[in-house]
Amino acid sequence: MLGLSACKINPDTPMQEFTVDRDYVRVGIISDSQLPNTREENEYQNSLIRALSAFKARGVDVVLFGGDITDLSKSKAYDLYNAAYDKVFGDDRPIVQTIMGNHDYWGHGVASSCRSIFKKKIGHGPWTHYVVNGYHFIGASPDSGSMDNGYKKIAEWLRGEIDKAVADDAGKPVFVITHNGARGTTYLEFPAGGDDDFVHSYKPVWSDGSEQLYFSDFYNGLTAMSSNVSLAVDKKAGTYGVKIYAVDSWGAVSAEYIEIDNVSIS
């Protein structure tokens, strides 16, 4: 269960509805570009461009960016992020849902200032609720730069948005996009020898209260994990119209992006 706090943030988040003209929605997942505060060409931006280019080649309809856009919450870093989309997609951008990560709260002394620069540069606030072909995607930024307690103030809002999505169509999964995980939710376990204790998470929540595994971007990289990262397809009846692509992007330092293709939500 998500814990609630008396000191809470309750943003006004109207549902934004989108329609794509295909039988299933192609979703690309990435996070942690951690772009530097510079206008100079750099490998972090180049790696982001490679990842977005892989999404473009696969015709993704939606890009979910799960936070840590910047290394520090700086204007030039956000400009690099937007320039990467311009370079790859031009005027034909897919639907992009972007959330903040802990790094996006660093560089300014006040969390509200970091959220303000995010909104100014990204064009929407840190918390969003998109509906694409009837599938709900809830963009849940943390409310602070804390990796341990980043969802305390926003938990009640998040629970309310999930309830709205379930009320809209209880027969479909609801996709919850976080950076670090909210307390009381489940992390995907790392294999023996794994040296990290959290993942960046994209979790479908079902109307009967059950939850699938996080579908995630890893600090360790997807190379060693790809055989273990999948949405369980044998626990629910029916096949839904979503295909997931994910790339490893920690710090965007890797030239090798590992595709997980043809994943249906079932």
Image (cartoon, helix red, strand yellow):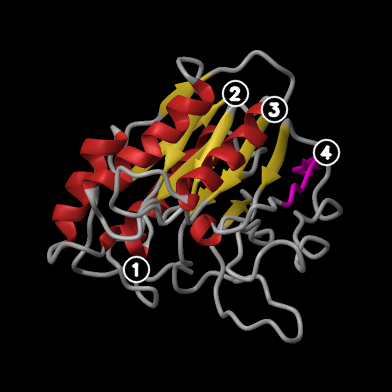
Q: Mark 2 — residue?
A: 133
- Looking at the rendered image, the quarter that the C terminus falls into is top right
Q: Give the CA distance from mark 2 to mark 4.
A: 17 Å
* Nearer mark to the viewer, of 3 and 4: 3
Dot 3 lies on which element? helix
Instruction: Identify the amino acid type marked 2.
Output: Asn
* Nearer mark to the viewer, of 2 and 4: 2
User: Which is nearer the N-term, disc 2 or disc 4?
Assistant: 2
Instruction: Identify the amino acid type marked 3.
Output: Ala
Residue 94 appears in the figure: no
Q: Nearer the viewer, residue 102 or 132?
A: 102
User: Which is nearer the N-term, disc 1 or disc 4?
Assistant: 1
Q: Residue at x 62, y 39 (%)?
A: 28
Q: Residue at x 46, y 31 (%)?
A: 85
Instruction: Identify the amino acid type marked 1.
Output: Gly
Magenta span of residues: 258-266
Instruction: Identify the amino acid type marked 4.
Output: Gly
Dot 1 lies on which element? loop
Quick check: 86 above or below 155?
A: above
Residue 55 among those drawn in magenta? no
Q: Mark 4 — residue?
A: 238
* Nearer mark to the viewer, of 2 and 3: 3
User: Which is nearer the N-term, disc 3 or disc 1?
Assistant: 3
Q: Mark 1 — residue?
A: 150
* Nearer mark to the viewer, of 1 and 4: 1
Dot 2 lies on which element? loop
Badge 2 crowding class, 10 Å Cα cut-off, few under 14, some 14 to 19, many 20 or more, is some
Q: Mark 3 — residue?
A: 57
Q: Give the CA distance from mark 1 to mark 2.
A: 30 Å
Give residue 198's position: percent from left, percent from top.
Answer: 55, 74
Badge 4 crowding class, 10 Å Cα cut-off, few under 14, some 14 to 19, many 20 or more, is few
* Nearer mark to the viewer, of 1 and 2: 1
